[in-house]
Amino acid sequence: MDGRIRWDQETHWLKAGIAGNGAFLNVNTPDGRVNPMTIAWGQVGIVWGRPIFSVFVRKSRYTYECLQSAQSFTVSVPRLGELADELALCGTKSGRDLDKVQACGLMLVPGRSVDTPILGQCGLHYECAIVARAQFEAPDFVSKTIHRKYESTDLHQITLGEILCAYITKGSANV
Ligand SMILES: Cc1cc2nc3c(=O)[nH]c(=O)nc-3n(C[C@H](O)[C@H](O)[C@H](O)COP(=O)(O)O)c2cc1C
């Protein structure tokens, strides 16, 4: 299959990706680059009657900083098992210190509906317009077990993006 899909059509692929080596959350940087960050947390669903992709980003990430001024983000999911080294680098190095697109040889392809590119080597893509941000604060954690997972004040912010389009490309790490 190649082309546009419904937002909820390939959730098994999305789930396997983020539960496996992760997926790329791509955001434009204030200085005109694109910063891919590996994510393992993410949800698609309906909020305000709209299809929404929610991502969870800690305050300490450069991605967090970029998301404060960005209008959109994209999520690019590799074909299963592909781009493991690139996901590892984008999940351990910060865009503050290096250009991860260059370092990994990632191919930027212009978004169809948003000003954030997608990654050409990936197969499944979501283009999202940012509609809301919500910052977790310590008192928000009803569950003490969950609260204990945070040793610091580096709490996640949830960014909700309306999925303007989702699609599959033939993109593969092997071509
Ligand atoms: C598999 C994997 C999944 C990750 N998922 C998340 C996530 O969902 N949210 C988050 O804030 N950090 C997550 N991280 C950590 C960031 O990807 C990592 O700190 C990254 O270097 C931050 O890059 P940045 O400073 O360029 O934003 C994950 C890391 C890995 C390896």
Image (cartoon, helix red, strand yellow):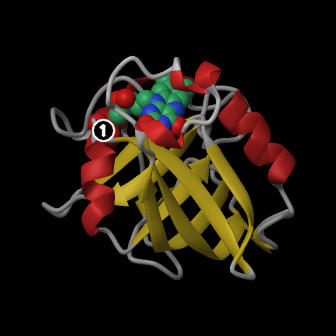
Q: Residue at x 60, y 39 (%)?
A: 41
Q: Residues within 10 Å of mark 1 (few under 14, many from 20)?
A: some
Viewer can see residue 172: no
Q: Which residue is mark 1?
A: 61
Q: Amino acid at mark 1?
A: Arg
Q: Residue at x 70, y 37 (%)?
A: 17
Q: Can you tell me whether the CB of the residue at mark 1 lies under 8 Å from the nearest atom of ligand 1?
A: yes
- On the image, the x and y values in percent for residue 126 come to 62, 64
Relative height, residue 166 to residue 55 (above, below): below
Residue 26 left/right relative to 167: left
- On the image, the x and y values in percent for residue 19 come to 71, 30
**Quarter containing the N terminus:** bottom right
- Residue 150, by quadrant, is top left
Q: Residue at x 39, y 17 (%)?
A: 151
Residue 149 left/right relative to 155: right
Secondary structure of the residue carrying numbered label 1:
loop
- Say which of 83 and 147 sits in front: 147
- Say which of 89 and 110 sits in front: 89
- On the image, the x and y values in percent for residue 69 come to 25, 68
Viewer can see residue 47: yes
- On the image, the x and y values in percent for residue 123 come to 67, 52
Q: Residue at x 52, y 17 (%)?
A: 148
**Quarter containing the C terminus:** top right
